[in-house]
Image: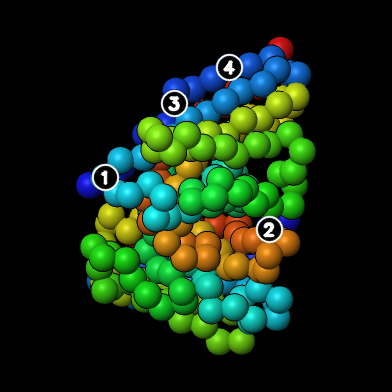
Amino acid sequence: QVQLVQSGSELKKPGASVKVSCKASGYTFTYFAMTWVRQAPGQGLEWMGWINTNTGKPTYAQGFTGRFVFSLDSSVGTAFLQISSLKPEDTAVYYCAREISMVAVDSWGQGTLVTVSS
Amino acid sequence: QSALTQPPSASGSPGQSVTISCTGTSSDVGFYNFVSWYQQHPGKAPKLIIYEVTKRPSGVPDRFSGSKSGNTASLTVSGLQAEDEADYYCTSYAGSKILGVFGGGTKLTVL
């Protein structure tokens, strides 16, 4: 079965960086784009963007350019989200999800809570 | 402020039907047939229940249905069950620069 397993929770200080991993299994990794979604505590969902798992080309949504980087290690079926210069407002659960159509993701990771606090 | 407008809450009794609206603009909901709905239970990852306005992924009960008219999309849950109590989010594709936009979510309560 399709499974996306994300790395564990992170506690970081402002200004630091974090890298979240998302390991896919149960399907051919390069057949589906990988999307990233953010959910701040008690808030709604935000599309961060996606990465083409064939070419490695990332596409970032408005508001997620500059400090956010999507990458892949296709040899092990894993996608990564790196956030640099962390701010307290980056505190959120970050989800990876497999895209089947525009704004349609059918399999989700369990989410990674990133907490930014001094 | 979310790009798509949903009612903050909705409710219904078991067995009844409830419809949740999602209003956007002619640049998103009204232009593209890429509207999805997600169900999220507390502390869990969202689950896709409707995509491309009306399609249901395999395993999603046919009690869930989607539609669209103009700039407003709708999710109807028929035959309400206790496990349908959750937050529901709509989303629409909005073009290559904005990508996707979400609604603020609707908390569905089964009375």
Q: Which residue is mark 2?
A: B2
Three-letter amino acid code of the residue under disc 3: Ser
Q: Which residue is mark 3?
A: A7
Labels 3, 2: front one: 3
Task: Name the image quarter holding residue A32.
Answer: bottom left
Host chain of mark 2: B
Three-letter amino acid code of the residue under disc 1: Gly
Labels 2, 4: front one: 4
Host chain of mark 1: A
Q: Is disc 2 surrounded by few (<14), some (14 to 19) or many (20+) residues within 10 Å? A: some
Q: Is residue B71 above or below residue B11?
A: below
Judged left or right of residue A67, residue A82 is: left
Three-letter amino acid code of the residue under disc 4: Leu
Q: Which mark is residue A26?
A: 1
What is the CA distance from the residue labelled 2 to the residue labelled 4? 28 Å
Q: Is residue B97 above or below residue A14?
A: below
Judged left or right of residue A70, residue B66 is: left
What is the CA distance from the residue labelled 2 to the residue labelled 1? 34 Å
Q: Nearer the viewer, residue A65 or B102?
A: A65
Q: At x 68% / y 58%, what residue is drawn? A: B2
Secondary structure of the residue carrying tag 2 is loop
Q: Are marks 3 and 4 in contact (CB under 8 Å)?
A: no
Q: Which residue is mark 4?
A: A11
